Image (cartoon, rainbow, N blue to C red):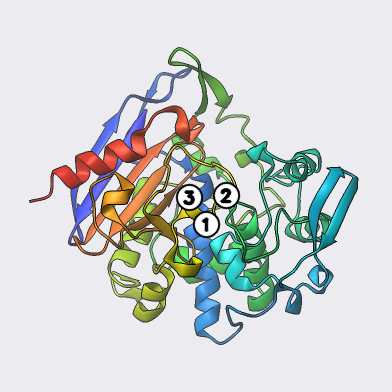
Amino acid sequence: GALTLVARRGEIAYVKAQGLMDVERNKPVRRAPVFRIYSMTKPITSIAMMQLYEQGRFLLDDPVHKYIPAWKNLRVYKSGVYPDFLTTPATSTMTIRDLFTHMSGLTYGFMNRTNVDAAYRELKLDGSRDLTMEALVSQLAELPLEFSPGTAWNYSVSTDVLGYLVQLLSDQPFDEYLREHIFAPLDMPDTGFDVRDDQLDRFAACYQYQPGDQFKLQDDPETSPFRRKGRFLSGGGGLVSTIDDYFHFAQALCQGGEFQGQRIIGRKTLEFMRSNHLPGNQDLPGLSVGAFSETPYAGSGFGLGFSVKTDVAKSQTNGSVGEYGWGGLASTSFFIDPVEELVMIFMAQLIPSSSYPIRQELRAIVNGALV
């Protein structure tokens, strides 16, 4: 099943629920299912961190080791397998900007590309509910980077580290910080790191794509890890939300940082965040060391928490320069077009997000409807 929402100039223009949110229990998709949004957590964490930037708590060019001393002498992978890596000193210092832009040299275990990401899998650094933020940061200090910071782009646990820094710099538990500074002001009562008892009836099942347009149950709502309060508050992929909650967040961004009289970020800060921060205004394929999504992202750079369209023709999808957004592992996605004052949010629960080319198709359909 799926749920799609399109809004323009602050008004919801289209909402469509399709199919079943739980095939085994024959539950149709309605307006308010609770979805695992996975990497759509990243823009929320990035906004939280930039709220602290506006308070002067850090600068983007600050070395990460200023706040995490164990990260002072990071090394880069040369050869070998965990735990017997041969490494070389990094030629550059990792900055907080590198964490925002995924140019840190960190990686994800699910990349299945290198001996470094194999170590992430072995150590369960991709979001085990039993991990803690402190344990993640401590383990990462012991592992080599894929490359020296700032020299390439690689999708990674960088935003989880930003979540840890939000907690550190605000002196407030990460989940409480998000609730107080983003979820409460924007009226997002169904967004959090676990599914409450009163939400269980609306919690969608998650499925894994199988060859031949088949699927199997990947995460049952009744027994889901999201049902127990996890210790790991993953800033990179830990949240559940609803389409209406996420619309409040996305619409705040579309309106320059404010929704229904509640401001979560300054207009100029947001403009800064949705600029392309890749060196030389390059696009993602020009800097990326490996594929990570069904969307090739040609003609898109990366800002402080989102992909940013820099070249419409090169992107091979209709739209506007400056359109920004991101998606999640289980086929959720959103984009915001500031030129057209347009917000699109798509919610589904099918892993991986590359099962169907839905993100490109949605852009074609939504932009094709504009007059």
Determine crowd level at label 3: few under 14, some 14-19, many 20+ residues with C-alpha closer than 10 A. some
Residue under label 3, please give it. 285
Residue 325 quadrant: bottom left
Q: Nearer the viewer, mark 2 or mark 3?
A: 3
Query: Could you say which is closer to the camera, residue 168 or residue 39?
Result: 39
Residue 210, position in %: x, y? 52, 17
Determine if residue 109 is in view: yes
Earlier-in-chain disc, 2 versus 1: 1
Label 2 sits on a secondary structure element that is: loop
Q: Which element type, helix, strand or loop, lies under badge 3?
A: helix
Residue at (48, 50) in percent of width and height: 285
Q: Residue furthest top?
A: 212
Q: Is residue 91 left or right of residue 260?
A: right
Identified by mark 2, the residue type is Gly
Number of marks in the rendered image: 3
Q: Nearer the viewer, residue 195 or 120?
A: 120
Q: Secondary structure at mark 1?
A: helix
Q: CA distance from mark 2 to mark 3?
A: 23 Å
Q: Residue type at mark 3?
A: Pro
Q: Could you classify mark 1 by the number of other residues whose Cα lies within 10 Å: few (under 14), some (14-19), or many (20 or more)?
A: many
Q: Is residue 69 above or below residue 135?
A: below
What distance separates the C-alpha of mark 2 from that of mark 1? Answer: 7 Å
Residue furthest left as drawn:
371
On residue 70, the disc is none
Q: Do the residues bearing badges 2 and 1 touch, measured as CB atoms within 8 Å?
A: yes
Q: What residue is shown with label 2?
A: 237
- Can residue 204 be seen here? The reply is no
State the residue position of label 1: 42
Q: Position of residue 50 (x, y in %)?
A: 51, 74
Q: Earlier in the sequence, mark 2 or mark 3?
A: 2
